[in-house]
Image: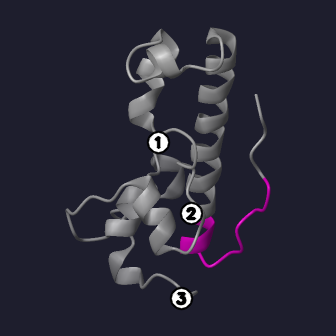
Amino acid sequence: HGLPIPSIIQTMDGRKPWDVLVFDTLDMWRGLSRDSISLDALAYALGLPSSKDDISGADVGPLYWGLPPFNHELPWDQEDAVKKIATYCNKDVAVDANCYLRMIVRPPIENVVTVA
């Protein structure tokens, strides 16, 4: 809804930003809760488009190796499969960045996905 996150649920644990080696939007989202959320569900909750419009993470291995369900339906060669996987990963990064921007009440970046 475009409201700033209350300071009581900030998850930096009192550490300085330069002392935090990893920043996870999942930790930022769940705050004091231990409930998990997928990137797809987080994007949906924040009103952002999903990166899962073509394949999902579960499809990456089978797509790369030509395993079911892609062994007989694969309309592209392995080079095309790698490009499809790279595009999927780029979309995930863009969606994650936009989730972060939405949570800090900044506008999302439009058209940030580049095709490999």
Residue shown at 65%/11% (left/top)?
77
Front residue (pair 58, 2): 58
In x, y percent, where is residue 11? 36, 65
Q: Give residue 1's mark.
A: 3
Front residue (pair 41, 76): 76
- Amino acid at the residue labelled 2: Tyr
Image quadrant containing the C terminus: top right
Specify the farthest residue to the left.
Answer: 34
Residue 107 inside the magenta-drawn segment: yes
In x, y percent, where is residue 71? 45, 14
Residue shown at 74%/46% (left/top)?
113
Residue bearing the label numbered 1: 21
Q: What range is drawn magenta here?
A: 100-111
When the figure is inspected, residue 28 is found, relative to residue 112, above or below; the finding is: below
In x, y percent, where is residue 108? 70, 68
- Amino acid at the residue labelled 1: Leu
Q: Is 80 positioned to the left or the right of 104 in the image?
A: right
* First of labels 2, 3 by sequence position: 3
- Amino acid at the residue labelled 3: His
The quarter of the picture where residue 49 lies is bottom right
Residue bearing the label numbered 2: 100
